[in-house]
Amino acid sequence: MTGKQSKNGLARMSSALGAVALIGAGLAGGVGVWAAEPIAPTLQTPTIHVLPWNGAKGAVSFTFDDGDKSQLSQAIPELDKRKIRATFFLHIGAIDDFGPWKQADAAGHEIGSHGVTHKHITPADEERDVSLANTTLVDTFGHPIWSFAYPFCEAPASLQQWVGKFHIVARGGGGSGKEPDWLNLPAFIATADKEIGPYQTAINEALGNGSWSVFMFHGIGWGTGGLTVKTATLAAVLDYVQGKDLWVAPFGEVGAYARAQQIVEKAPAKTANNGTTWEWTVPAVFPKGVVLKIKVDSGKQLAQKEFVIKPDANGICLLRFDDGSASVK
Ligand SMILES: [Zn+2]
């Protein structure tokens, strides 16, 4: 047990170094957050318009890595105080007590997978690292685990294939294409030397560009490592994100909405009997109950499975992604 713990301690430390090295590259390349609109507007289907980011102007997700105990004592109280739900990526080899994480899960935070041992995953270990971590977390928490974060942000295609068998979104080093790379999404890496300014910039970018800013935190408050962020800084970031037209939600929740949106927008339209129908396939691995906010052109009526869906006072209809089809007349 002692040997195992010290091994994990070393793994965490080298993880910190790996991440620091990435920051320069990430920010210089503008990969820290999506600069471009993640889903091209040309994909919008006629007459049905999905509102991105659950109807907000942009999205923000707070993610915390490695199951560091300071997250339980420092981050979660600050999040809960402001009713902000976040994502915690646990690598199962480092967790000696899942109890507090079960409480966080029950309180609405998301638990994601960060693999088993936080080593550089070799091709021979890819299946085991991803599937064993997933099985352990699913058994422990009693529900699917939708999100994954790559140790050291290393996301080779072969590893992504395993991740995609169990998870719907993954946080890695980035992908800079016009369309989001769901299994390798970029993040802003929080470090000890950053004051509030860079966080505000990333939050303003989400708002201004209609994009999704994902923040990656490690230790909060304790210690002197390069990735340890002061509790006061985290609190200031959480204060800053509030009261804005932003969807602040766990990584997997935003990812599920955005993926469902993309699938609906790509669904081909079939027109017959003066109506239009769209059909899409819900991925085999996907959360149930995803609902998209949509607007339908005036004078048109939306239906799913023969039931008419009436807009609310703001003209917004709720589209059930699970239905796999919708029609407008
Ligand atoms: Zn990590």
Image (spheres, rainbow, N blue to C red):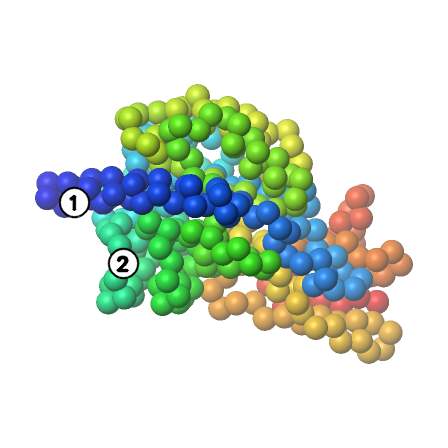
| Residue at 29% across, 48% down | 91
The answer to which quarter of the image holds residue 20 is top left
Q: Say left or right for 151 vs 310.
A: left
Secondary-structure class at tag 2: loop
Could one spot residue 98 in this view of the protein? no
**Mark 1 C-beta to ligand 1 under 8 Å:** no
Q: Position of residue 287 (x, y in %)?
A: 51, 58
Q: Which residue is mark 1?
A: 7
| Residue at 65% across, 64% down | 264
Q: Say left or right for 77 vs 128.
A: right
Residue type, mark 2 in image = Ile
Instruction: Spot the residue most to the bottom.
Output: 272
| N-terminal label among 2 and 1 | 1
Cα separation between marks 2 and 1: 15 Å
Q: Position of residue 191 (x, y in %)?
A: 39, 33
Q: Position of residue 317 (x, y in %)?
A: 74, 53
| Residue at 35% across, 43% down | 21
From the image, which quarter does the C terminus lie in? Answer: bottom right
**Callout 2: 10 Å neighbours few (<14), some, many (20+)?**
many
Q: Position of residue 215 (x, y in %)?
A: 47, 40
Residue type, mark 1 in image = Lys
Q: Nearer the viewer, residue 163 or 143?
A: 163
From the image, which quarter does the N terminus lie in? Answer: top left
The answer to which quarter of the image holds residue 190 is top left
**Callout 1: 10 Å neighbours few (<14), some, many (20+)?**
some
Depicted 176 relative to depicted 274: above or below: above
How many marks on residues?
2
Could one spot residue 16 in this view of the protein? yes
Secondary-structure class at tag 1: helix
Q: Which residue is mark 2?
A: 121
